[in-house]
Image: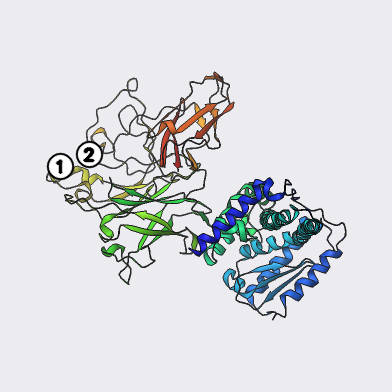
């Protein structure tokens, strides 16, 4: 109750402040505070502030024999030597120091000194990329004189307050209220200025990292590491009290600068493995997470806006379930129970880049949850290849439906959608595979004039080599067929050998025309392979992506457009017939295009997609472009 009362008081103060009440201010509105303050051309104030900062810091014990600290110092030197910093022509002496403290923190002084505590060095260790993320941020603060800006803005607010206080002493009846309003508004404005400068340091630091040879994804990896290991303020608490933005906000605003930083990194460091920071780190993003009660499936569903970068294999999803008071939930199925007997859910999931990702849904059946525990709290962790925690969600509610009393079948298996391998990666193309070996069958010979060309089966995922399949030997082919008619399968009816083959078409006698091994059987009587269906129609239109995923969007609100490039890949001009949207929720997606009636050879045009959800939850659709063989999957989350 105390916290609620405090929030109400502050909200009333803000409302009072921004209404500009004439009764309160004596018919005078509070003055408009400036958003920025000009910096002085000289640096005397920078060195004065640094002296004050050292006094406030007090005596510290410097650590010189810390291995992680020495890595940090080496990274620091590589960052300050970049042209991006030298072009500022700053009169500072750049210095890195490591102080003995359990605080997980780093900060900078206004004369070029950057300080880190051993609590932070133990968390980062010898990871050069993470050190670069922390130190580039602090160097950006110094180089762009952020602390000086904040100090001057604070002094500007104090001058405004003193002015209105003086007016009040001179008899201006409304000036006292105005002074109070300026005090409150100034405090909020100072917090906002500070948070904006933090965002600026994030963006400039990311660019500095990229130019020095540290992949910009290290910034997100460091954000997530700190968020997992430090408490997060609420949005209201951040607005009123914090001079640092929330980690979620930092991720969102830094993502906007990521493209520029990545382009700069790629331009300067074409081989990441030879860069100072090494290969880019695996990073995961959970976005919004929600728990939904699925009565039809008798499950509690966790919907995750999951995406990853630099992840070459499926990730692990660890789901923690607790009661409302934080106590654990007892497990009743051994497969989902830890050593203490509590519910433990550990599942694998595909994790693709944001452009290719679709919503991930974890279906948790009622059968693994005690009947009395239907309203629970959930938290999801994303683990990388080495079981390191890449991301952790906030704690959210999930409700489980009651089990039907007449139900005769109990499903106790957690299911994750999309299933592993069910979602193609961006840029993935079809590849040929060997036709599957089956029981010998008779195929009627075909003449070249009537035989339809048949291609090998297309499958995903791609494979550069033909798959080895078991084939019968000549001796086996001469054996009686009775073994098969008695129920034996080809695997126990024949002696198994491996043959790597890649048949492309059949000749006029029904035999594959190209073989990679001399063991291939001869004669129409030995045609033991399965004939593939006719080849797919040759596409005339190419589309730039196979999946479009929209982040969470309020119901009945239009999202920003997503672009799909449409290209004529033939040698002649094509008549463009348009595109259609089908699937589960076609009315939730709107498509427009700048394509004309005809598309010239090799020419391209753009199709724009907008997500406007008509209801809550995951909404899906399919976009079919005439002339393209690939169907584009659409997905988004309405809220």
Left or right: where 77 falls relative to 597 = right
- Say if 504 sits above or below 189 in the image: above
Residue underneath mark 2: 440
Q: CB atoms at circles 2 and 1 under 8 Å apart? A: yes
- Say if 413 sits above or below 513 in the image: below
Report if residue 266 is visible in the image.
no
Locate residue 19, reporting x and y percent: 64, 46
Q: Quadrant of the C terminus?
A: top left
Viewer-proximal residue, 581 or 386? 581
- Helix, strand or loop under label 2: loop
**Label 1: how many residues lie within 10 Å, few (<14), some (14-19) or many (20+)?**
few
- Say if 462 sits above or below 110 in the image: above
Measure the C-alpha gap from mark 2 to mark 1: 9 Å
Locate residue 460, reporting x and y percent: 40, 42
Task: Identify the disc placed on residue 193.
Answer: none
Residue underneath mark 1: 481
Left or right: where 111 falls relative to 100 = right
Residue drawn at (25%, 41%) of the image = 438
Viewer-proximal residue, 281 or 568? 281
């Amino acid at each position: 109750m105390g916290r609620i009362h405090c929030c109400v008081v502050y909200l009333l103060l803000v409302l009072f402040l921004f209404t500009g009440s004439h009764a309160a201010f004596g018919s005078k509105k509070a003055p408009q505070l400036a958003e920025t303050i000009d910096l002085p051309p000289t640096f005397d104030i920078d060195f004065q502030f640094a002296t004050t900062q050292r006094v406030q810091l007090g005596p510290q014990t410097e650590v010189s024999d810390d291995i992680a600290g020495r890595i940090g110092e080496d990274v620091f030197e590589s960052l300050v030597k970049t042209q991006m910093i030298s072009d500022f022509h700053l009169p500072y002496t750049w210095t890195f120091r490591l102080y003995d403290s359990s605080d997980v923190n780093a900060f900078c002084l206004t004369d070029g000194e950057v300080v880190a505590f051993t609590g932070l060095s133990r968390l980062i260790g010898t990871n050069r990329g993470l050190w670069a993320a922390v130190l580039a941020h602090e160097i950006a603060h110094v180089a762009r004189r952020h602390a000086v800006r904040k100090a001057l803005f604070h002094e500007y607010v104090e001058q405004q307050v003193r002015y209105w206080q003086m007016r009040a002493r001179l008899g201006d009846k409304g000036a006292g209220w105005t002074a109070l309003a300026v005090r409150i508004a100034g405090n909020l404005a100072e917090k906002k200025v500070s948070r904006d400068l933090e965002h600026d340091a994030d963006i400039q630091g990311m660019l500095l990292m990229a130019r020095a040879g540290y992949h910009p994804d290290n910034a997100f990896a460091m954000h997530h590491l700190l968020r997992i290991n430090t408490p997060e303020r609420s949005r209201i608490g951040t607005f009123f009290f914090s001079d640092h933005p929330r980690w979620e906000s930092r991720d969102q605003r830094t993502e906007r600068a990521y493209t520029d930083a990545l382009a700069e990194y790629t331009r300067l460091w074409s081989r990441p493995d030879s860069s100072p920071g090494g290969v880019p780190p695996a990073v995961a993003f959970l976005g919004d997470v929600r728990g939904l009660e699925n009565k039809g499936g008798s499950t509690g569903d966790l919907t995750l806006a999951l995406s990853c970068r630099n992840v070459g294999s499926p990730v692990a999803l660890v789901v923690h379930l607790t009661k409302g008071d934080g106590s654990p939930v007892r497990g009743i199925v051994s497969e989902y129970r830890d050593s203490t007997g509590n519910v433990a859910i550990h599942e694998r999931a595909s994790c693709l880049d944001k452009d290719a990702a679709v919503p991930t849904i974890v279906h948790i059946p009622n059968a693994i949850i005690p009947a009395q525990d239907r309203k629970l709290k959930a938290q999801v962790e994303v683990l990388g290849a080495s079981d390191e925690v890449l991301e952790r969600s906030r704690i959210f509610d999930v409700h489980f439906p009651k089990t039907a009393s007449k139900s005769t079948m109990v499903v106790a298996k957690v299911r994750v959608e999309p299933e592993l391998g069910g979602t193609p990666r961006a840029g993935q193309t079809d590849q040929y595979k060997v036709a599957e070996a089956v029981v010998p069958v008779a195929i009627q010979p075909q003449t070249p004039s009537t035989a339809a060309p048949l291609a090998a089966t297309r499958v995903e995922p791609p494979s550069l080599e033909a798959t080895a399949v078991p084939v019968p030997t000549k001796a086996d082919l001469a054996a009686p067929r009775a073994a098969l008619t008695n129920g034996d399968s080809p695997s126990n009816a024949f002696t198994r050998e491996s043959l790597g083959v890649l048949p492309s078409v059949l000749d006029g006698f029904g035999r594959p025309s190209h073989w990679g091994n001399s063991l291939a059987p001869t004669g129409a009587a030995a045609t033991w392979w399965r004939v593939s269906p006719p080849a797919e129609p040759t596409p005339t239109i190419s589309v730039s992506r196979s999946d479009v995923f929209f982040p969470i969007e309020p119901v009945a609100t239009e999202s920003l457009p997503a672009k799909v490039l449409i290209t004529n890949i033939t040698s002649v001009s094509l008549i463009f017939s348009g595109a259609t949207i089908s699937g589960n929720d076609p009315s939730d997606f709107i498509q427009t295009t700048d394509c004309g009636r005809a598309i010239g050879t090799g020419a391209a045009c753009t199709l724009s997609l907008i997500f406007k959800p008509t209801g809550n939850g995951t909404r899906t659709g399919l976009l079919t472009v005439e002339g393209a063989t690939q169907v584009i999957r659409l997905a988004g989350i309405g809220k």
